Amino acid sequence: MPNPPRCATCRWWDPRGFAEGYGYCRRNPPERQGESDDVGAWPYTEAQGWCGEHELVPPANPVVMPNVHHVSLDEVPLRHET
């Protein structure tokens, strides 16, 4: 059986929460949390939570580094201040 969709595997989940295993759902813009709140907030969720809008984190694109000529520090002329 494949792993069920969870917040921890969703592209919209930000694990930088205040506690281990918790994070923010960034699927939608922040929302007011109460009548007196002037500032919105993202929903705070558990890593094992889920919803109907789960999207898997896309695979990382491999970064192709250009050919770089490595230079020894012995080859770099020193700049003397006068």
Image (spheres, rainbow, N blue to C red):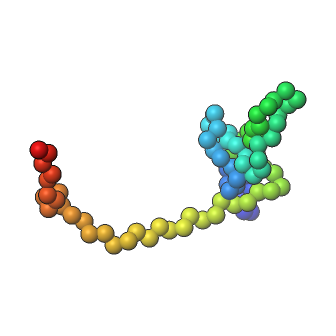
Q: Nearer the viewer, residue 47 or 53?
A: 53
Residue 75 horizontal side relative to residue 54, left or right: left
- In this view, the residue farthest toward the top is 36
Residue 52 visible somewhere in the drawing = yes
List x then y, in percent, for residue 28: 77, 50
List x then y, in percent, for residue 22: 67, 39
Query: Splitting the image into 4 quarters, where does residue 44 fall?
Result: top right
Residue 48 visible somewhere in the drawing = no
Looking at the image, residue 37 lies above or below residue 52: above
Q: Nearer the viewer, residue 41 or 6?
A: 41
Q: Nearer the viewer, residue 27 or 52?
A: 27
Q: Quadrant of the N terminus?
A: bottom right
Looking at the image, residue 27 lies above or below residue 37: below
Q: Quadrant of the C terminus?
A: top left
- In this view, the residue farthest toward the bottom is 67
Q: Residue at x 85, y 27 (%)?
A: 36
Query: Splitting the image into 4 quarters, where does residue 34 fall?
Result: top right
Residue 48 horizontal side relative to residue 81, left or right: right
Looking at the image, residue 54 lies above or below residue 26: below
List x then y, in percent, for residue 5: 75, 56
Q: Nearer the viewer, residue 14 or 80?
A: 80
List x then y, in percent, for residue 4: 75, 56
